[in-house]
Amino acid sequence: MIQEIKSNYKNLFEDELLEEINQVGTLKEVPEGFELIKPGSYIKSMPLIISGAIKILREDNDGDELLLYFLERGDTCAMTLSCCLGSHKSEIKAIAETDAKLIMVPIEKMEEWTTKYKSWRNFMFDSYHKRLIEAIETIDSIAFLKMDDRLLKYLTDKTKVNQDSIINNTHQEIAYDLHTSRVVISRLLKKLEQKGKVKLNRNTIEVIQI
Amino acid sequence: MIQEIKSNYKNLFEDELLEEINQVGTLKEVPEGFELIKPGSYIKSMPLIISGAIKILREDNDGDELLLYFLERGDTCAMTLSCCLGSHKSEIKAIAETDAKLIMVPIEKMEEWTTKYKSWRNFMFDSYHKRLIEAIETIDSIAFLKMDDRLLKYLTDKTKVNQDSIINNTHQEIAYDLHTSRVVISRLLKKLEQKGKVKLNRNTIEVIQI
DNA sequence: CTGTTGCAGTAACATTTGTTACACAAGACT
DNA sequence: AGTCTTGTGTAACAAATGTTACTGCAACAG
C-alpha cells in the first residue's frame, strides 16, 4: 500500500509520517454510488483520497438534498476532521462519484499527528481552508446565479471531476443535486442544446464547449 | 488590556499564551458600520472579538452582496486565518454590526503559537469548524427556504446578535443583506406584520414573537 | 412480437421573486 | 409655514422557477 500513499502524498508529508500512515491506515476501495457517510452518523476514521472523486451533499429534514462540492485526489473531508476532533455528528452525506480508492486513518491518530507533524497540521488547515472556500463558492452559485448558469457550472464541474465530457446521469439525478425539479432541468438542458453547448441523449449528456 | 483578554479567553487559553497575547496584541475599538475587511485586500493581523458583533458578507463581481454570518464575542474570522496562513486575498467583507472591541494579533505569531500552544491549535480548528458549519447553514437557508422564512430567520438572528428585539434598519439595508430588492422586503414585512410577528415603524422593526 | 418500465419532451398553469413606477408620510432644513 | 430628502406602501407587470399532466420513445423481459 505504501506505493499509493507515496505517489499521492509524498510532496506533502514527511517520510516518517508517510510511514506511520502506512502502518495504521487501511486501503479502501469503493464503487461508484457507494454511500461513505450518512448524515447524522458518527465517524470513526478519516479518509485520504487516493483516486476517484467523492461528492458531498447537504440534506435537509425533508430529505431534500443539494450538492456542496466534490473531493478529489489529495483531498480529505473537512467535515470529518471537525466531527472527529469535536466528536460532533456528521452534517453531510458523502457518495462516491466514481470508483474510488481511499486510505482510512483512525481518528486517534489525527490529534497525535497534529501535535507531532507540522506537515500534517498544515494539511489540516489547508483542507479546512479549501472546503470553506468551496462552501462559499457554492453560496455564490446559489445566491448570484440563475438556474441555467448553475446547471452549466454543474456540468462543467462534473466533466472536470470525471475527466470525461460525457456525463452519465438522468435529468432527475441532476435535479436532485441542484435541488430543483426534473422538468426544470429538462427544459434548461434543451435550451443549452439549442445554443450548441451540450448534446443530449438518453442517459447521457455531452458537454461540447467548456 | 490584560483584563479584557482574561475575562474573555481565560478558560480557552493557557496563562502563558494569554500573556503573549497581551504583549503583542493591540486593542482596537470600532464604531458600528466600520469596514474592517475589504474584499480583495491582504490582511496583516487577525482579530479576536472581545465585545460587539461583526457581520461577514460575500460580494460578487457586480457588487451584489449577501450576508454570510455574524461573529461574536470569543469568535475570530476563519477567512483571516486562512488568508494569513496561505497569504491569499480576502474573499469577504467584514463590517462592524455594532460598536465592537477587538484584539488584533500580528500574523507572524499565529503560526508560532500553532506550534507552541495546544489550546491555540484547538481554537483555530474550532473556529474553522464553526465557520464551516455556519457557511453550510447559510447554504441551507438560501437553498431550502423561501424568502419569507429567510427574512424571519434574518430578523431573529439579528435580535440575538444585537440583544435587542428592535432592529434599526431600513428595508433597503435588509434587502442588501439578503440579496433581494427593497420592494420584496417591504412586501414580506407587511405580511409578517399582518401575522403579528413584527411591528413596523419608520427605520425600525420590532420582532414580537421569536 | 408485446407489454412494462423508466426516461425525456412539452404544454399549461401556479407560485415566487424581481422590476418599474408612483403616491404618500416623516423628518430635516430654510 | 414650505421644501427636500429619505423611507415605506402598493399596484401592475415581467421573469424565473415549480407543478401537474400527458405524450412518446427506447430498452428490456417475457
Image (cartoon, coloured by chain):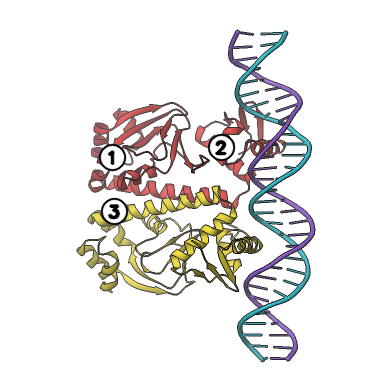
Chain colours: A yellow, B red, C purple, D cyan
For this rendering, which residue is in front, B56 or B52? B56
The spot of residue B199 in percent (x, y) is: 66, 31
Q: Which residue is mark 1?
A: B107
Mark 1 vs mark 2: tell me if same chain: yes
Q: Quadrant of the rendered structure where residue B157 is?
A: top right
Q: Is residue A66 visible?
A: no
The spot of residue B19 in percent (x, y) is: 24, 34
Marked residue chain, label 3 = A
> Is label 1 or label 2 in front?
2
The spot of residue B68 in percent (x, y) is: 49, 43
Kind of residue at disc 2: Tyr
Lateral position of residue A119 relative to residue B141, left or right: left
Kind of residue at disc 1: Ile
Lateral position of residue B82 relative to residue C10, left or right: left
Q: Residues within 10 Å of mark 1 (few under 14, many from 20)?
A: some
For the C terminus of chain B, the quadrant is top right
Marked residue chain, label 2 = B
For this rendering, which residue is in front, A202 or A1? A202
Label 1 SS: helix
Q: Which residue is mark 3?
A: A122
Residue at (25, 64) in percent of width and height: A10
